Image (tube, rainbow, N blue to C red):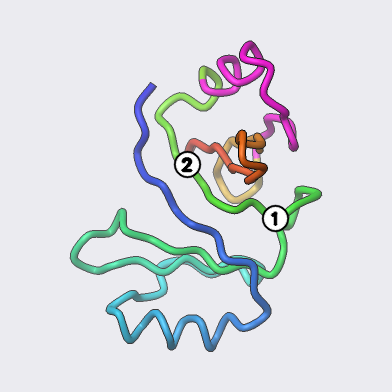
Amino acid sequence: MTVRRVVPNIQSEAAQESREFYGLLGFEEVMNHGWIMTLASPSIPAAQISVMTSDKTAPVTPDMSVEVDDVDAAYAVMRESGAEIVHPLQDEEWGVRRFFVRDPSGRVVNVLGHH
């Protein structure tokens, strides 16, 4: 299994202000679904920050997202380890397959792969 990118998720009702703030550091909006907006560095596109009001289809807002090349394998590893699955593995309408897992410090991690 290979990690493709790691993105911090900031829960906020101030999306416009966040876009402007992180724009001062060179980030540009690359995705906006209304409830989640992703900002990325034009020179290093995998350097990203997501700002979200709340998660559209999950019971909690994740603290970070980790994109992997094989989300099914990641899910199997986490289940076998006994880690707490916060949100089950599922396909989302916006083209990702994902699940949420809680890390040892209590952070919720959105583990995903693109279709």
Task: Give the SS element for disc 2.
Answer: strand
Frontmost residue, 14 versus 72:
14
Q: Amino acid at mark 1?
A: Thr
Percent x, y for residue 29?
41, 74
Q: Amino acid at mark 2?
A: Val
Residue reaching furthest to the left: 43
Residue reaching furthest to the right: 59
Task: Give the SS element for disc 1.
Answer: loop
Neighbor class of circle 1 (other Cα within 10 Å; few <14, some 14-19, many 20+) is some
Whether the magenta-drawn stretch holds residue 82 is answered as yes
Q: Which residue is mark 1?
A: 61
Q: Which residue is mark 2?
A: 66
Percent x, y for residue 95?
55, 45
Residue at 33% across, 75% down = 27
Magenta stretch in the rendered image: 74-91
- Whether tag 1 and tag 2 are in contact, CB under 8 A, the answer is no
